[in-house]
Image (cartoon, helix red, strand yellow):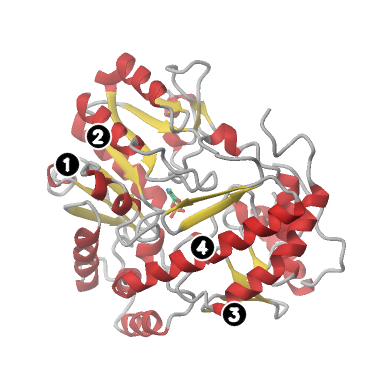
Amino acid sequence: MPTATPSSTPSAAPASEALFARARAVTPGGVNSPVRAFAAVGGSPRFITSAKGAWLTDADGNEMVDLICSWGPMLLGHAHPEVQAAVQAAVARGTSYGAPTVPEVELAEEIVARAPVEKVRFTSSGTEASMSAIRLARGFTGRDVVVKFAGCYHGHVDALLASAGSGLATFAVPGTPGVPASATELTLVLPYNDREAVTAVFAEHGDRIACLVTEASPGNMGVVPPEPGFNEFLSRTCAEHGALFVSDEVMTGFRASRQGYWGIDGAVEGWTPDLVVMGKVMGGGFPAAAFGGRADVMARLAPEGPVYQAGTLSGNPVATTAGLTTLRLATDEVYDHLTKAGEVVKAGVTDALDAAGVAHAVQSAGTMFSVFLTEGPVRDFAEASRTDAGAYAAFFHAMLDRGVYLPPSAYESWFLSAAHDDRAIQTILDALPDAARAAAAAQDPAAGTRA
Ligand SMILES: *Cc1c(COP(=O)(O)O)cnc(C)c1O
């Protein structure tokens, strides 16, 4: 990760800086999830004290248009009155019983009605959901090997924090200290959008592969959509070899479209994943995630079947109430609004970066989009890695100084909400020209173009 120079103007956030110093004294890096620390863009992270609609307020009283939306979940905007009322009513009834409740049944019904799953099991995080989906795939098939793509993130599951081995069909190596080689020696990591690589590993290891897991449309290396027919090809290849196709829709689910990315992909082409991993939007801003899929596969899960999986707070009544209320309010009008607002923001970004002479690629997957500061199209992790991180850091800080809170990393999706109204969008558009010029001034002449 490059360390970039933050803006040279005097700090506009002394209270956040003081809080960051306090936080660092008691928490590694001062944060509870690494990207929040601003390490990739430099400077001190803002401590958020409240949020409403499209706006965040930090500890210094700065108001910022939020383009992170909690990394996706806040589809309706912050502190939505109906979600808040439902949550407050749920809290008043007690917060956790360790016994079945009504809202978890209702949320499961809502998810089964929208997503390509027959049965669903709740967890508290996307990490747990993908870990459990992989255990279930292994338990169902009686096989051990898992195939994933470089640049796809499925939470911090040991077996999936893996980097490609030395050759295409060689097993992976740990992607971080703390993951033993034994945890990744059954993982194969391939370049995204590469059909030949998929065909080759299935030809060599097909009878050992329990599942292939992929983001339905990757959003964790920036938005890198599957090439037309790629997911259908993956689904078919898995089926031909008796492996399960696991589609990770934690980010795209109920966000890219009403039915997630599948709604603009499998639902149109006529295929369904065997298992789907979900999270973010379906938790409505609370810790709730899920995995689901074919009834015969899900039937292998305890207590119906032998594959163990559990959670003290799984299906928590407050979290599932927030998720249920959010999904019920996530109507076609919400997705139309996200599409239209996204078009305006994307056009503004393109115009500003064009005018400033900054190489860029704005890529979309349904209502999701991101901005790469490199020439496009970006089709895989190697191409995403060409983005000019220093120019992005300058762009990020110039936007922040003008009241727009972008993801503090060049490799992330930008998130809008139903609450991004004309005033919020205009604030973004007004900030873009100066930020594009800041990016131009910071450009690395070696980055941004193809090698
Ligand atoms: C965020 C994310 C996860 C992990 O979810 P957590 O709730 O952070 O554990 C998994 N997969 C994808 C695609 C994600 O975007």
Q: How far from the left and from the top, in percent, is residue 344?
A: 55, 66
Tell me, for residue 244, which label it has, or none: 2
Q: Amino acid at mark 3?
A: Arg
Q: Nearer the viewer, mark 2 or mark 1?
A: 2
Kindly report the distance in space between the C-alpha atoms of the residues bearing marks 2 and 4: 36 Å
Residue highlighted by disc 4: 343
Which quarter of the rendered picture does the C terminus lie within? top right
Q: Amino acid at mark 4?
A: Glu
User: The residue tagged with tag 4: helix, strand or loop?
Assistant: helix
- Left or right: residue 350 compared with residue 198: right
Quadrant of residue 68 within the rendered picture: bottom right
Quadrant of residue 38 within the rendered picture: bottom right
Residue highlighted by disc 1: 297
Q: Nearer the viewer, mark 1 or mark 3?
A: 3
Query: Is 298 situated above or below 191?
Result: below
Mark 4 CB lies closer than 8 A to ligand 1: no
Which quarter of the rendered picture does the N terminus lie within? top right
Kindly report the distance in space between the C-alpha atoms of the residues bearing marks 4 and 1: 39 Å
- Nearer-the-camera pick, 127 or 193: 193
Q: Residue at x 69, y 35 (%)?
A: 449
Q: Residue at x 30, y 50 (%)?
A: 262
Tell me, for residue 423, which label it has, or none: 3
Asked if residue 242 shows in the view, the reply is yes
- Nearer-the-camera pick, 297 or 348: 348
Q: Amino acid at mark 1?
A: Val
- Left or right: residue 266 compared with residue 8: left
Whichever of callouts 2 and 4 sits on the residue coming sooner in the sequence is 2
Tell me, for residue 108, which label it has, or none: none
